[in-house]
Every structure is written in structure tokens, then in C-alpha cells.
Image (tube, grey):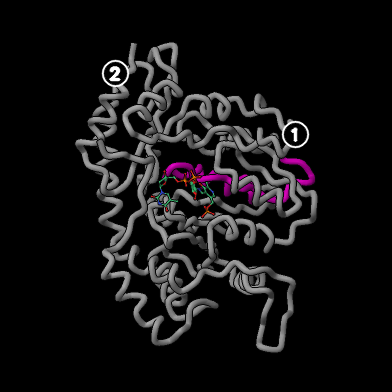
Amino acid sequence: MNKILVTRSSMPDYEEYCEEIKELWDSHWLTNMGKKHKQLQAELETMLDVPHVTLYVNGHLALENVIASFNFPKGSEVITTPFTFASTTHAIVRNGLEPVFCDINPKDYTIDVTKIESLITDKTVAIVPVHVYGNMCDVEEIERIAKKYELKVIYDAAHAFGVTYKGKSSASFGDASMFSFHATKVFNTIEGGAVCYHDDSLTQKLNDLKNFGIHGPEEVAYIGGNAKMNEFQAAMGICNLRHLESEIAKRQAVVERYRSNLKNIDGIKLCDPKSDVKSNYAYFPVVFDEKVFGASRNEVMEKLAENGIGARKYFYPLTSVSPAFNEKYDPSDTPVALHLSKRVLTLPLYADLSLDDVDRICNIIKSCKM
Ligand code: T4K
């Protein structure tokens, strides 16, 4: 029986990628913001409808750098959620800032905007909300709060490439948004990421941070690091962008098949798309209520694994309970996130997952029901 993993990288035809990288053998120009890098950046600015895109070697360094670009005083507080990939919290902490964990809402698992204001102190400088699974945060309420308290908003939009809210690109909200172009994402550049923003003055800061602060052959004006996307990554992005629409349409068909198979089952909760959000179908989370369903999330995961199917617990454990924090944060302060992290399972989802395989996965899940 063929193994099915939680996702599988989207790739162009081999010939298409070879054609795209062919000229690199002529030019020998492999990195440092070359031709492919510039082309992908321009294509993304158009596609995401945002004035500035700065490309990165991966999403994490994009997030770490964009937070750094605001020069927040060390020890300042940043409101975020623990129901995310380690990267979000790490990017805050690695900048010498203090994460303040806000709970998520039980409907779409993004930050609970009704709880943000009570967490604001005179040390708060920013909110780092996470658009989870291809859904989007309540961007309007976050904007209202940020304006009222003069806070920066930096979205972790790793899961939200190509998503729109009321027809507006996910890249257009907040002071900046970070996208991940990792191999496991809806759109990939093998590894990669980007920061999208409106403010012209951020461009120099982000370039300084990702390219050693080099301003010219004889001028290093800032103590920056190295986080540049290379030409092979950019070439992969150029190819994958051509197929994005059809990849998302195929994902949508997979998600619709999952929904029709798993709707109205006692003890299974599906995550409803927010109205006005056009998803990219990045992940398919299912929440198991053991008392009603008769089997726990972990038991379902094991049963799937016995059948060669690799579902994953995105996101368990909460980032706030990492042993690196030495019990500094109490997960019971974010009860919805804690509850969800113990029950959620993300099912296999990628463009070429066959509908027969979706049916098979759902039948195995249904067979776990007591
Ligand atoms: N913020 C959020 C909310 C994020 O979810 C992420 C990344 C980031 C920030 C940081 O962005 P990056 O710096 O990564 O650009 C994976 C990804 O590595 C990670 O990018 C992603 N989130 C996270 C949710 O998932 P793992 O440790 O679960 O990946 P792994 O290696 O177990 O792969 C999962 C499955 O994907 C495999 O079973 C098969 C498939 N796969 C994997 C690889 C590496 C492929 O088909 N091709 C591949 O090359 O973290």
C-alpha cells in the first residue's frame, strides 16, 4: 500500500525547472539578489498586490528580521498566540522581546481579539498574530486595537499565501506580513520566505539585516546577517507560481471531499472557513472530542499510521510549554489553545492527493468511532 504523508511538495515538471535554471549555467550567477530573485520579487508584488516584497532564504528568518527591523527596546512585550509553529515564538524571543500569550478563538483558531486589550501594558510594542491553516485573523479588529494603543502589527502569514479577505490580499494587512515558502507550503521555493509591507523605509532595514548591512563594495553600514534567497530557490518559485491557481483548485477539491465525508459526525469538529475569506486550503484540521467520538485524537492518528497514513498534530504542544522556557508560561492561561492542541489532527492534504485516498482516509477515521 502506498504511504501517504501529511503533505507532499508541489513541484513543476522536471523539464520546466531545468529550462528555468539553464541560464544560471551561462551566467554563473547563483545568489546575492540575481536576476531570478528580482523577477520573483516583482511577480510576487503584482500577485500579492503589495508595494514591497523582500525575499528571504526561509520564512523564519523573514519573521525574525522583520521584527528586528522595528528596533523595539529589548524586553518589550509582544502579544502573540501559542497555537503556532515554534518559529513564531522563537522569532520574538530571539529578538530579546517578551512573548505575551493571548488565547485563540474556538471558531477559527486565530487570536481571540476580545482578549488582546486586557494583555496590553506600557511595555507592549507589537502584536504578532498568526493566520492559521489558510484562514485569516480578525484583521479589522486587530487594526482598531493597534491604532488605539499605537502598536505595530506583524502577521505571521506562513499559512496564508494567496488568501484574500473581502477580496484584499492577505499581504496587505498590518505593518508587515511574513510568508513561508517552505517545501511543505501551498507555494514553495524549496526553502524560502518573504516579508510584504507598504512602508518604503523598511526596505533598506530589511536588506541590511539579510545582507550584512552591505551598501556598496567598500561600505558595510550595518551589522546585519545573511538570509538571502538564492537563484535556484527563486527559479523554483517562478515555476511554481505559474501553477498556483490550479494547485489551489486541486487542494479545494480534496478539502471538499474531506468535508463531505466527515460532516455531521458526532465528536468530529471541522474548522469552518471565515465568511469573506477565500482560503488557499493550506491544511485540513479535524478536532476529535474523545467522549463523544469514542476515540481520542492520538488513537485516530495511530490507526492512520498503521495504514501508512501520516496525519500530524499541528500544533501540539503549544509553543509556550517548550522546555526551553522552563515552565515560565502557564498553558492554562490560554485554555482554548490548550484544549485544541490536545485534540486537533491535520489530515494529509496536497494537490495530487487522490479523492479515492481521501475516501480511504475518512473510512479509517470513521472506523475508529465507537
Ligand atoms: N510560522 C508558521 C505558522 C509556520 O507554520 C512555519 C513553518 C513558520 C512560521 C516558519 O517558516 P519556515 O522557516 O519553515 O519557512 C514543517 C515545515 O518545516 C515548516 O515550514 C512548517 N511551518 C511546519 C508547520 O511544518 P515539520 O517538522 O512538520 O516538517 P517535516 O519535515 O516533518 O515534513 C512534513 C511533511 O511534509 C513530510 O511528512 C513530507 C512532506 N515533505 C517534507 C519535506 C521536508 C515534502 O513533501 N517535501 C519536503 O521536502 O515542519
Give the percent coordinates (x, y) of residue 216. Answer: 66, 86
Question: Given the image, on which type of amino acid does mark 2 rest?
Answer: Ser
* Residue 146 part of the magenta segment: yes
Q: Alpha-carbon neighbours of circle 1 within 10 Å: few (<14), some, or many (≥20)?
A: few
Q: Residue at x 41, y 81 (%)?
A: 24
Q: Which mark is residue 1?
A: none
| Residue numbers of the magenta segment | 120-147
Residue under label 1: 326
In the orientation shown, which residue stands out farthest toward the left?
356
Along the polypeptide, which appears first: circle 2 or circle 1? Answer: 1
Q: Residue at x 37, y 37 (%)?
A: 284
User: Where does the N terminus fall, quadrant-wise?
Assistant: top left
Residue under label 2: 367
Q: Is residue 78 above or below residue 70?
A: above
Q: Residue at x 64, y 47 (%)?
A: 127
Give the percent coordinates (x, y) of residue 129. Answer: 57, 45
Q: Is residue 13 above or below residue 361?
A: below
